[in-house]
Image: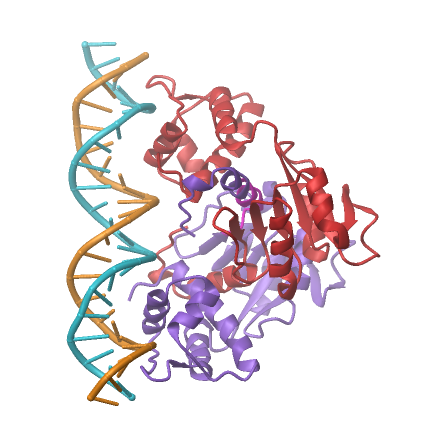
Chain colours: A red, B purple, C orange, D cyan
DNA sequence: TAGATTGTTAATCGATTAACAATC
DNA sequence: TAGATTGTTAATCGATTAACAATC
């Protein structure tokens, strides 16, 4: 089976939507319905669902509750995974407030900053630690995912430290290509670049060959 | 010429890097050097540069200053483009502080919120307007790009209003597939989905077939 | 010149889409 | 049953990579 990051991203979107639909009392859904809500093709939805080993029924489509369970079983670690955010600036704080309490299986357990004004406090419900002792704290808490929101000059150093402490997945907001070992996964969110892409295609929609 | 959003994103990254290198006194660069810094192949760098109509020299590689000019000429609108941010919550404010003053050709000229505590003020250097009069304000200021950071329930409504007021490019942070006319370009940043992708591949790196 | 690099075409690769038999 | 939908294979599409002649 071929599992690309695009498939995982779509599964995550399916789950979120299905979760809402179930709360509204829906029990079944057809591929084309889900597809139009997510903005993909029905064939793609069917293939993604096939990929995770769940099966629908030609008469009733997919059972929403079961499909949500299947996706959760596929995506989530059984015992959950713990996340740390490094860099409690404006963006870091916004991300803390955004994620706190959202996914119990993927919870931000710690924030780190080098500013004494920031560590030692609880910010948006998250305990903030000194980055001096980051490596030990990450090990003690059993954190395996890092969100990097430090200034670009510190991003690589930060990555090195948290990887050494046991982090194997990084969501990186710093605009730099991090160098990491082959067994560490990095996903970048580069807001400047994305905004420039929007600006370009807002003027050149004829050329648009959107792939993501 | 085929111009995908990936090419535009890479060009944006090349420009940022080259800009820094030039400030450090470098005048020339080879494709493989730029490639290793951005994390792509040298062939890809050469093809991208070819795409924008700039040429290097087998002896000296690319002239950094000229290449930056070529990329700017390709990416930027001559007279610049104006951006509005809608939704001055935690994330919205963080994005304001992130972008303000960064790119003169792509400047956030206005923020909008429905909360009287927020509009009428200047936040992170950006004037905040009431969203009651959003359509007119956008028209008057000549804004063509929107950044949507409102709650998910309001995102579609917000998109409809700003598109009607003349916006043709949207950077959307709300986790919903916006329905827009064919001549409007939308790029989504979905932090929850991206974090879930990181979590998945941090546990399954053997399956990793990263495409972005 | 010799050698490294560029520009550009052809081959490869992977993901998406189309198509349709199997199913309820 | 008839008809719509699912599961799954084959065809298509686009982007990346490999290769190499042209160039300085």
Q: x%, y% of residue A62?
A: 41, 22
Whether residue B102 sits left or right of residue B69 in the image: it is right
Which residue does the image show at 55% across and 20% down from the upper left?
Answer: A25
Magenta segment, which residues?
Answer: B188-196
Q: Does the magenta stretch include residue B113?
A: no
Q: Which of B130 and B66 is in front in this view?
A: B66
Which residue does the image show at 58% across and 24% down from the upper left?
Answer: A23
Placement of B204 over or under B93, stated as above or below: above
Whether residue C7 sits left or right of residue B190 in the image: it is left
Q: x%, y% of residue A203?
A: 42, 66
Q: Nearer the viewer, residue A111 or B11?
A: A111
- Magenta span: predominant SS is helix
For the N terminus of chain B, which image quadrant? bottom left
Q: Is residue B27 visible?
A: yes
Q: Does the magenta stretch include residue B191?
A: yes
Q: Which of A179 and B82 is in front in this view?
A: A179
Q: x%, y% of residue B76?
A: 47, 73
Asked which quadrant contains residue B206, the reply is top left
Which residue does the image show at 76% across and 51% down from the upper left?
Answer: A133
Q: Can residue B130 be seen in this view?
A: no
Q: x%, y% of residue A163?
A: 60, 49
Placement of B127 over or under A186, stated as above or below: below
């Amino acid at each position: 089976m071929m599992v690309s990051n695009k498939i995982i991203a779509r599964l995550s979107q399916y789950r979120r939507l299905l979760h809402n639909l179930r709360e509204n009392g829906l029990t079944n859904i057809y591929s084309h319905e889900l597809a139009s809500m997510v903005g993909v093709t029905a064939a793609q939805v069917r293939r993604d669902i096939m990929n995770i080993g769940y099966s629908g029924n030609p008469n009733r489509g997919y059972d929403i509750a079961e499909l949500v369970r299947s996706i959760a079983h596929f995506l989530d670690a059984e015992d959950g995974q713990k996340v740390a955010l490094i860099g409690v600036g404006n963006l870091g704080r916004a991300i803390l407030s955004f994620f706190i309490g959202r996914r119990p299986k993927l919870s931000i357990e710690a924030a780190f900053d080098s500013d004494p004004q920031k560590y030692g406090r609880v910010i948006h419900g998250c305990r903030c630690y000194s980055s001096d002792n980051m490596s030990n704290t990450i090990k003690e808490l059993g954190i395996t995912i890092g969100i990097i929101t430090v200034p670009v000059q510190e991003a690589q150093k930060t990555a090195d430290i948290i990887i050494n402490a046991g982090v194997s997945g990084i969501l990186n907001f710093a605009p730099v290509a991090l160098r990491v070992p082959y067994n560490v996964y990095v996903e970048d969110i580069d807001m400047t670049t994305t905004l420039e892409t929007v600006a370009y295609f807002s003027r050149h929609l004829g050329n648009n060959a959107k792939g993501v």
